[in-house]
Structures are given as C-alpha cells and as structure tokens.
Image (cartoon, coloured by chain):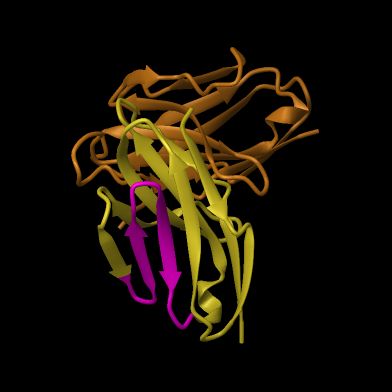
Amino acid sequence: GAGVSQSPRYKVAKRGQDVALRCDPISGHVSLFWYQQALGQGPEFLTYFQNEAQLDKSGLPSDRFFAERPEGSVSTLKIQRTQQEDSAVYLCASSLRLSGTSGNEQFFGPGTRLTVL
Amino acid sequence: EDQVTQSPEALRLQEGESSSLNCSYTVSGLRGLFWYRQDPGKGPEFLFTLYSAGEEKEKERLKATLTKKESFLHITAPKPEDSATYLCAVRTGGYNKLIFGAGTRLAVHP
C-alpha cells in the first residue's frame, strides 16, 4: 500500500531563492502535519491541516514559511527567500483522524532534505 | 511548558544484551505517548501508542510501558537490525501536534 510520499527528496538552494516542497498523504487521511528536523534532533512541529483548513501554524518560524492544502489532499510547504538556518529535513505526516484513541497515529514520509548554500 | 526528555542519548549493545530506553515527560494533560523508530535518511516509523499509566504494548523484541511521568522501551535480546534512533513523542490536551524528544541512538553489534 502507498504510504506518505514527499518530493523532492533532496533540494539544494542558493540563499535567497524560493523553494516548494510537496507532500502526498495516505489516501483518505484527514489530517496532515509538517515538521522540521535538524541534525541529531527530534522533529519539531510546524503546522497542521484538517482537510483543507489550516488549524495550527504556530510552529512556522517566520512569515517566509507558508503551507497550503487547497483540496484537502496534497500539501505544499513553501519557503521564500531561503536562509542558511532553513537547512534541515522537512517531514510530512498524515493521520486518519485527530481525536479518539485509535486512528490518530501519524505516519511519516521520507522527508525532504533542504540545503541552503 | 510541555517537555520530553530521552535518555541515554546513545546506547551501544552487544547482540542479545537486553536494555531499556527512557522517555520522561512533563505535559499538561497527556493525550497519548508515541514511540517511533527512525533509520538514517528515512522518516520516523510508527511503533506504539500508549494512553494511560500501566498500559503495555509489545511487538517482536520491543515492549513499551507507561507511567504517569515516563515511558520505557524495553529491547529484549536485540539484533543488529534493531540499530536505529528511537524517538518518543507526546500529544497533549487540546493540541494535535506531537512534541518529540531528541531520540536515543541505538547501535547493536554482533
């Protein structure tokens, strides 16, 4: 069965360039999450969607970061005017639902490794 | 502030040498504690969810337990293929995001 997929897997950008990272969640999953993982650290929350609604964007580090999920399926994380400190692995995760005690496990994609030179 | 601390940072075991990884948490209303395994260059792979103190779950050589302040991931008779980073995360009341610890890097040598 298809899991969460992300593209590109690797992205090298020059400082100041804009980048767009794509996430295809598991089919039928309502919730979609973006995390940022620095080397040697655990993932840190950026934002999440329930269907097409962005319900929490408290983890986005600056207004250069923007995420969307216009049709409630595929999501794009966009970073404008990239800086060296944006270098990290960006992980996408999806879950079937948000509440309750089953079906809210988050399943992660392989990540996109962004390097800003 | 919600916080998750994992120990040790790194652990080296001989094949067959059982041990435990610790995850301590300070949160305002636990809505689930999650264990993930992460291999180099890959995303975290879901292992277990625990919801209440006293709960235990097992999968092959792994067993996860939960108390009111911490969780343990017990590894029985590990094999080299168990080598990975093990991440602990919590979901707290009113929020759906996961708060992760920094992970424990486990190396199992033949």
Residue sitting at x 34%, y 27%? B95
Residue that lies at the very extreme toward the top in this rendered image: A63
Identify the colour of chain B in the image.
Answer: yellow
Q: Which quarter of the rendered picture does the C terminus of chain B lie within? A: bottom right
Q: Which residues are magenta?
A: B59-78
Q: On screen, A15 above or below B110?
A: above
Residue sitting at x 22%, y 34%? A99
Does residue B77 belong to the magenta stretch?
A: yes
Q: Examine the rendering and report whether any part of residue B50 can be seen.
A: yes
Q: Is residue A17 left or right of residue B1?
A: right
Q: On screen, B74 above or below A4?
A: below
Magenta span: predominant SS is: strand
Q: Is residue A63 left or right of residue A30?
A: right
Does residue B67 belong to the magenta stretch?
A: yes
Identify the colour of chain A in the image.
Answer: orange
Instruction: Point out residue B58 in the picture as x, y percentages from the top left corner.
Output: 30, 69
Instruction: Point out residue A81 in the picture as x, y percentages from the top left corner.
Output: 70, 18
